[in-house]
Amino acid sequence: MGGGVLIGLAAFVIVVAGMQAAAPILVPFLLAVFIAIVLAPVISGLQRWRIPPVASLVIVILGLVLIGLLLAALVGSSFDEFSRSLPLYKARLHALMSDSLTWLSGHGVAISRQVAMDYLDPAQAMGLVTRILGGLSGVLTNGLLILLTVAFILAEASGLPEKLRAAFGEPETSLAHAAAVADNINRYMVIKTVFSLLTGVMIAVWLWAMGLDFWLLWGVLAFLLNFVPNIGSIIAAVPAVLLALIQLSVTGAALAACGFLAVNVLIGTFLEPRFMGRGLGLSTLVVFLSLIFWGWVLGPVGMLLSVPLTITAKIILASNDRTRWLAVMLGDGKIADETEEDDGVTP
């Protein structure tokens, strides 16, 4: 038993090291897979409207290209301008921090300036934005590769069951089981993408109405980080609130924070749980650890993909009796047998 555990741990270390070494290739591929998962229902919907499969694929790919070009044009210019203004914002934040420490010292609360700057430096939160979006833009330089991979995945998806039957005979139980797992992953990704988009739009509109600079950039950041529940909304809010403090006032920063809080409570507490279903949640500790782990393995984009990757692993683990205990450990205590309830499939 002990030898088996050691072999398993050694295999895990080797796999993780291989993933880290292959990150420049693996990250665009994973992005393509998740984009294809989100777009698959769109192609199915077009085909139900009597549009031929090839035409449906072309329409979806052209739509993806158009959205990508639009985002690149709108967000790219904002990101460049924000990067140029970042040193000024950091200087203002340091000045605000210094004034706050002086005020606290005058009221009998003595805090070392050096310690405060080392451990409570708000300027680091502004730099986090450039690291996350910079890492994403670096990956998107392989946009053509990602686009082609998405197109090939979508084109091959419809013929996969026939290939499996031809290769393995008539594995109907295995195919039905795999289809149930794939449906759960697809449902999670589609629902999460829709509500993340809604979150980003609502945040962007709120900050635009306040007159905050780079409101579109903060909306995109809120959309991306909404894939990381609990922690992501906090990370997305901090730089926007700090900018509101610099550009507007304390009241403006409070209004920005209230906007983030209201949107995330509405989406995360009331809307998402109604559509997401049971058994797809992760514990807060697992979310945090997955953020660290996938960020270390795959870089900044790995942080954005951390929860979808962990949710995928959890769904696969929960679909097998022998590994269900691992899914329970990863979850939030609300494990449900999705495959049995939704599809009548017994693992």
Image: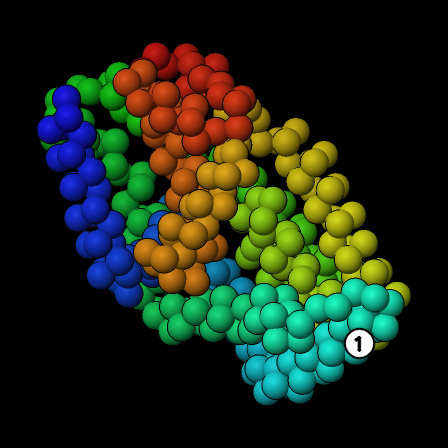
Q: In front here: 42 or 36?
A: 36
Identify the residue at horizontal 36%, vertical 57% (top origin): 296
Q: In front here: 305 or 10?
A: 10
Identify the residue at horizontal 76%, vertical 73% (top origin): 101
Secondary structure, mark 1, is helix
Identify the residue at horizontal 50%, vertical 66% (top origin): 132
The quarter of the picture where residue 253 lies is bottom right
Q: Percent position (x, y) of residue 264?
A: 70, 46
Q: Percent position (x, y) of residue 152?
A: 29, 53
The quarter of the picture where residue 315 lies is top left
Q: Is residue 179 visible?
A: no
Q: Percent position (x, y) of residue 41?
A: 47, 41
The quarter of the picture where residue 295 lies is bottom left
Identify the residue at horizontal 58%, vertical 52% (top origin): 232
Q: Percent position (x, y) of residue 125?
A: 60, 68
Question: In this picture, is 15 found above or below 61?
Answer: above
User: Looking at the figure, which quarter contains the C terminus?
Assistant: top left
> Disc 1 residue type?
Thr
Q: Residues within 10 Å of mark 1 (few under 14, many from 20)?
A: some
Residue bearing mark 1: 102
Colour style of the rendered protein structure: rainbow
Question: In this picture, is 225 found above or below 313?
Answer: below
